[in-house]
Amino acid sequence: MNLLIGNIGHLSVIVAFAAALVAAYGYFQATRGRALGNDDASWLRVARGAFFVHGLAVFSVIGCLFNIIQAHRYEYYYAWSHSSNHLPVEYMISCFWEGQEGSFLLWIFWHVVLGLFIMRFNRKWEAPVMAVFSGVQLFLVSMILGIVLGDVKIGSSPFILLRDFLTDLPVFKLNPDFVPKDGTGLNALLQNYWMVIHPPTLFLGFALTLVPFAFAIAGLWKRELTAWVKPALPWTLIGGGVLGIGVVMGAYWAYETLNFGGYWNWDPVENAVYIPWLVLVASLHGMVLWQKRRTGLRTSFALVIATFVLILYATFLTRSGVLGNASVHSFTDLGLSGQLFIYMAVFSVLAIGLLVYRWKEIPISEKELTLYNPELWVFVGATVLCLGAFQVLFTTSIPVYNSFMGLIGIKTNVALPADQIAHYSKAQLWMGVFVALLSGVAQIMWWQRNDKTTLVNSLTAPTLLTLLGTALVVLLVRYNGLTITPAYVVLTLAGLFGVLANFGTIFTLLRRGVRLSGGAVAHLGIALMLLGILASSGYSNIISRNVSGLLYSREFDESLNRDNVLLWRNETTKMQNYDLTYTGQFFDVPGVPGYVDKQFLFRTDDEYTALARAPIVAGDKTYYKTGDTVAILPENTYYRINYKERETGKEFSLYPRAQVNDEMGEGGLLASPAVKQFWTHDIYSHVSSVLDPRKEKQWSEEKDHVLAVGDTIFLNDYFAVFRAIEPAHETAGLNLQKGDLALQADMIVHGEKRQYHVHPVFLVRNRLVGRVPDEVDDLGVRLSLTNIDPVAGKFTFAVSTTQKDYVILKAMEKPFINLLWSGTLLMTFGFGLSVWQRGRKGGSPAVADAPAAPAQAAKPQPVA
């Protein structure tokens, strides 16, 4: 057992906690009773030094935790419960943040990085802002402190020993130093490259929401009620872009990994991230209004504070265990729910209390807004975003409401909606309609002097083009035999208007020599996302309908029998415009591109190794020769499905993944889709049922055949030719020794479309006879060489059969889903463009601006 690394890690957590406490107190004393920027130098040095120590301690904790994972130190519960010996290196990184403690540590790490940026680039605001930062770090580090004071547990340590966590296991009573040889491994759904980059992006987004919050609190604290917006606005832009891309990364992971056929399932944990992002974007618009038009400052304060409070609430939802029965991927309760609630309550009460205290001092605009003021429409857009966030928040919080009422002795049974997807989607799509329309109108109005004439002239072209485009879409939809509801007509109209209006704004600005508007680009991306969601979700088409007239199984539900196609191995089956052929099972072999046919591998007693039965070749390179030992990843089986389009003859192959896993409930099939992307649509396929590889095959009673070399036998619908008898090779895993006699038959089995070489083995060792049968999975045939008569030249073969291999496949066509992903990229580019433009204008080197109006912000000038 290596206890040193854990002791160093735990000590580093304690140092990080103490240093955060000193930093928070030092920064507070440095700025207390002083004007902004006129800080006490001695306290400031103490605070800075403490924060640097805090950062070094956090890096030490991260290094120690990575070490126990990478070095497979299974004496620690965190390493044992999240990693395993055969986990690829890239997924060991995912192990780091799979657990609660690791995800908190990731969040703490990003706060350290952002704090260092603020110390370097925002010296004037450093003391009050970093006082808030250090206070937040103090609470976050307490979540991984892992100490017990009396009956009170403070935090959950990632360095707890396995024997201290699983104290009731008998093995530790017999041997306290027992260390498992292997860990339980990483959740199969998280073994995806998106899980390597998605959590760091998402937690960076979480961390970035603290920056405008800290500036807002500092502004209220120091009575700098207007000055805080300028330094906070660029950080808000970065936060909106990063958190948005983090949310969409999660959606794409779901699309590529889960098999529910979409990218957003309105799971409460998904909602807990989506809600603060909507409010963050709304706060961004409020800050832009104040920065450029001197209106909406109170709204900005309220929304910035609400964003951070909602981040804390999301943390409480996902880590307190309150969603245990409502969400499929929330964390379990580690006994920290009370601590999480205190954390949320402290910052919520302090922030809201300070805002209320200063409310009357916050400047308000005396300007009366009319229909011709773009500020009005930006404000309305922010309101729509907040209403959309509230709708999701209200429903997601039902389990919290029930739990709270239970704590005060009132039993409630308020239930979540039966169809949550429909419940959320109805309201959220209409929110998308208003956002698309308002973004187009506001962008047009933002860049010109508005009156009735100019506004009508500006809106005429995009409106007419939108009407024509919507009419064309309706005609095309009906021409293809589909229906379109009035609601979808309105949604299409809104999306097209958002695209055309924002594209028109971009074109006009470029034509007039004005810099490109990052806001218009971001809004254009959001409008494209709306159209992509409408097309891919509203017109997703199941192309694997069962037209055979057969019921696959009475044990299957109706949808599985109706919406799936049965594919026998190496038999071609028609599916709409495609001919499909299931050609076998494949494994992922580290170091070999693509996948390796399972028939080329002879499994050994070690499930993670196999012997190459033939050269393993990819492209022009041979990776393994016959007889080589091959490292494999056996958890997942990939089923190769060949698609051939009948009209064009074009072919492609998909490899949907499946894993038989008891943790997935009855049936135990964990299936991930394979996606073929085209410009206009995706083909999305996943297996719904396979032969359970854990179960022994049910073979028929063996039939003996006595053959001589050159003889032919019939095997059901096939025939086989006995070609030769030859020395056996090591590829069968025989572990041949001196004195062994090993012979193998060379049989050629003629299937429907190809020939198969079969090599049953006859082995004599120490006067004992052993037989190693060989199978043809494609045909469901097994042959054994059971006896040899060398005098007569006769050989006895035992033949048995089993059910042929098959998969039941579901395939869907997702039209124009690329609009969603390309819209996401455009949105992110728009945020990034605004950041870059603000940097060019002399803002913070780390940050930049939102879409800007002309130079005289209070009185917008027409661009001529």
Image: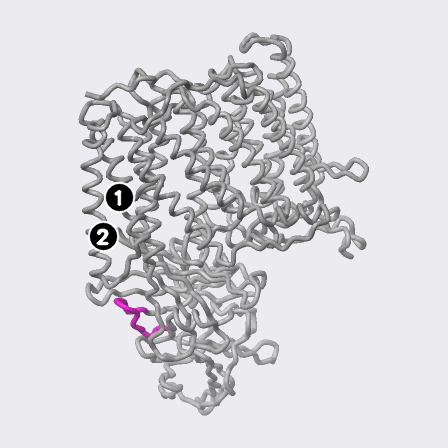
- Is residue 793 in the magenta section? no
Q: Quadrant of residue 639?
A: bottom left
Q: Quadrant of residue 2?
A: top right
| Nearer-N-terminus badge (1/2) | 2
Q: Position of residue 181 (x, y in %)?
A: 65, 53
Q: Residue at x 27, y 25 (%)?
A: 447
Q: Is residue 208 visible?
A: no
Q: How many marks?
A: 2
Q: Which residue is mark 1?
A: 496
In this rendered view, identify the residue nearer to me: 444 or 602: 444
Give, as a three-letter code, the residue at label 2: Val
In this rendered view, identify the residue nearer to me: 232 or 24: 232
- The region drawn magenta spans 569-580
> Is 508 placed above or below 320 here?
above
Q: Residue at x 56, y 42 (%)?
A: 97
Give, as a three-letter code, the residue at label 1: Leu
In this rendered view, identify the residue nearer to me: 673 or 491: 491
**Is residue 65 shown left or right of residue 702?**
right
The N terminus: image quadrant: top right
In this rendered view, identify the residue nearer to me: 632 or 210: 210
The C terminus: image quadrant: top left
Q: Position of residue 591 (x, y in %)?
A: 43, 51
Q: Residue at x 22, y 43 (%)?
A: 466
> Is 248 placed above or below 810 here?
above
Q: Which residue is mark 2?
A: 473
Q: Residue at x 49, y 54 (%)?
A: 420
Q: Are marks 1 and 2 in contact (CB under 8 Å)?
A: yes
Q: Residues within 10 Å of mark 2 (few under 14, many from 20)?
A: some
Q: Residues within 10 Å of mark 1 (few under 14, many from 20)?
A: many
Q: Position of residue 439 (x, y in %)?
A: 32, 35
